Amino acid sequence: MVNVLSEASREQKLALINAHPDLAGRLKLADLTADSRTEQSSAGLDSLTQEERSRFLKLNNAYKQKFGFPFIMAVKGRSKDEILAAFEDRLEHEQDIEFDTAIEQIELIALLRLKDRLPSVADVFSSLA
């Protein structure tokens, strides 16, 4: 997937970026894919206070206004505070840097999801014994 993505045009990459939902956005968790729902829930994005939700919505809007695409971050294993800090840091990026960062985060999300689905080599060998 990473190899195919590296060969994709900027327009194709942008379409992939735009296919991602906002973090803690206006979509209900039930409207997300099972993977996204689990990842956002594990980061506590399903139990935001009204103040936290407002902050996420404000950052999502500022990010989209500046870059023209949604903020993407592999949130598995991250906390709300880490995600908010990343939002604020990445809002300082230039357009090209943030575009590349979004693609890197998509690659990381894919890697983490594959690791969850594929058995480790040790598991394969122990099942053969």
Image: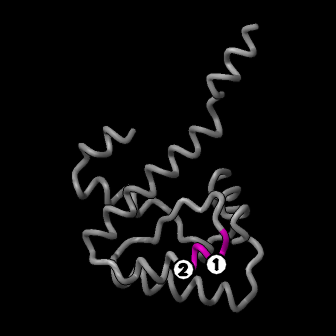
* Helix, strand or loop under label 1: helix
Q: Quadrant of the C terminus?
A: top right
Pinpoint residue 17: horizontal percent, then vertical percent: 40, 61
Magenta-colored span? 79-84
The reply to whether callout 1 and callout 2 are in contact (CB within 8 Å) is: yes
Quarter placement of the N terminus: top left
Q: Which amino acid does the dot numbered 1 rest on?
A: Asp
Amino acid, disc 2: Ala
**Side of 95 where 82 appears, left or right:** right
Label 2 sits on a secondary structure element that is helix
User: Residue 104 vs residue 28: left or right?
Assistant: left
Extreme residue in the top direction:
129
| Front-lying residue, 102 or 19 | 102
Where, by quadrant of the figure, is residue 122 drawn? top right
Q: Where residue 85 is drawn, which disc sits there? A: 2
Residue 45 colored in magenta in the image: no
Mark 1 nearby-residue class (10 Å; few <14, some 14–19, many ≥20) = few
Query: Considering depth in this image, is 78 or 4 the residue closer to the camera?
Result: 78
Residue 127 in the image: state x and y as whole percent: 75, 14
Left or right, residue 126 beside residue 80: right
Q: Residue at x 22, y 51 (%)?
A: 9
Residue 118 sits in quarter:
top right
- Magenta run includes residue 81: yes
Report the Cα–Cα distance between label 1 and label 2.
Answer: 6 Å
Instruction: Specify few, some or many for label 2: CA neighbours under 10 Å numbering under 14, 14-19, or 20 or more.
Output: few
Rendered residue at 59%/62% (across/down): 75
Residue 31 picture location, percent across and down: 66, 62
What residue is disc 1 on? Answer: 81
Q: What secondary structure do most residues of the magenta stretch adopt?
A: helix
